[in-house]
Image: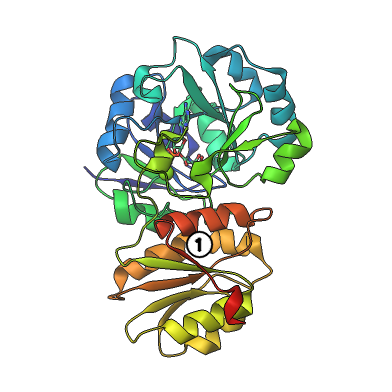
Amino acid sequence: MHTQRLSAADIAPAAEILRRGGLLGIPTETVYGLGANGLNSEAVAHIFEAKGRPQDNPLILHIPSADWLERYCEDIPEAAYTLARRFWPGPLTMILKHKSIVPAAVTAGLDTVGMRCPAHPVCRAIIAAADLPVAAPSGNTSGRPSPTNMADMLEDMDGKIDGIVDGGPCVVGVESTIIDLTEQPPRLLRPGGITLEQLESVLGEVAVDPAVTRLMGAGEQPRAPGMKYRHYAPKAPVTVVQGAPEAAARYIQTHLAPGDGVICFDEYAPLFEGHLMEQLGPSTDIPEQARRVFDALRWFDGTDVQRIWAQCPDAAGLGLAVSNRLSKAAGFHIIRAEKFC
Ligand code: TXA
Ligand code: MG
């Protein structure tokens, strides 16, 4: 299949690909998505094929505004509208009970569906022109880091999708926050662009699913099916070193072997000269770290590093999402460096 390259101005041809049941690479503010008509089971099945995605991992629906929630969802709590007023359009996905119009191909047979109203203007224009709910997982091959620019998505999807729209690099860089509103207190299933603290400021108490911060044991079932799979992982094994940035950098410097690579904060780059290295941005600039984290992980797949050591921000604010993605890439192989100061 030839994958058509479209520009941000090609809204009509992009929408046409969705309307005729094709697969479209779509820029969003979080990561690039692999979109299809969310009401067309056959088109949705092609998403799973292109990604090599396990069938039991449901997709989320992208809609142009909160007004569309009632078309696809029922028993919608007031909190959903409050969150929508505050954070939509934006990087927040809400899990709600779905109506029967939503195909099982999207929900993997669950009685709930993830709903998101994205903020990227090109994405919004395409959804509006297609006049459809767009089912879209991240545009990577299953298991690989999510793509945050068109080139990264083409690396995985060139020849497998009908078209891709270049909307520039993603401004958030990690996927949307997922909040399950079907239970009380609401439960954070995946940290992302909207922080836990922001959600708590609206919802009061928020439960954090254990899959956010640790490896699920055998027999344990995370609420977001996707959280149980190996994710975001480069070919080389990753070790995350948490703790004060200086202590973590010194720990890595001490344990680094020839042939190892490093993901580090900008300030510590001089310590790792001579090693393959990706910089995450300044240790204090977490939005920049979020923008760079997937690209950094992806980059090492083009190298022959034996092992990757990664510095990691604290779990406060957007740091929870960055730390979650790095920890998942490491299979939760995490070391705390406080003692090495
Ligand atoms: O930022 C994002 O959310 C991106 C962009 C493209 O919008 N999309 C994205 O989709 O990250 P995906 O499929 O890569 O991740 C969605 C996650 C998966 O872990 C999936 O298991 C979970 O959401 N999920 C989907 N529907 C669910 C449901 N009904 N209940 C619980 N988890 C659900
Ligand atoms: Mg994904």
Q: Is residue 166 left or right of residue 74?
A: left
Which residue position is annotated with label 1? 293
Judging depth in this view, the residue of 220 and 250 nearest the camera is 220
Q: How busy is the neighbourhood of tag 1: few (under 14 within 10 Å), some, or many (20 plus)?
A: many
Is residue 25 in view? no
Q: Residue 155: image x %, image y %?
A: 32, 56
Quarter of the image with the C terminus in it: bottom right
Q: Quarter of the image holding residue 282?
A: bottom right
The image quadrant that residue 34 belongs to is: top left
Q: Residue at x 49, y 20 (%)?
A: 112
Q: Is residue 144 left or right of residue 102?
A: left
Amino acid at circle 1: Val
Q: Quadrant of the N terminus?
A: top left
Q: Residue at x 57, y 82 (%)?
A: 268
Disc 1 element = helix
Residue at left 74%, top 29%?
85
Residue at image point 43% right, 49% down: 215
Q: Residue furthest left?
A: 1
- The count of marks equals 1
Which residue is nearer to you in this view: 242 or 260? 242
Along the line of sight, the residue nearer the viewer: 186 or 302: 186
Q: Residue furthest top?
A: 100
Position above or below: 96 against 100: below
State the colouring used for the structure image: rainbow
Q: Position of residue 202 (x, y in %)?
A: 77, 33
- Answer above or below: position of 22 versus 156: above
Instruction: Indicate which quadrant contains ligand 2.
Output: top left
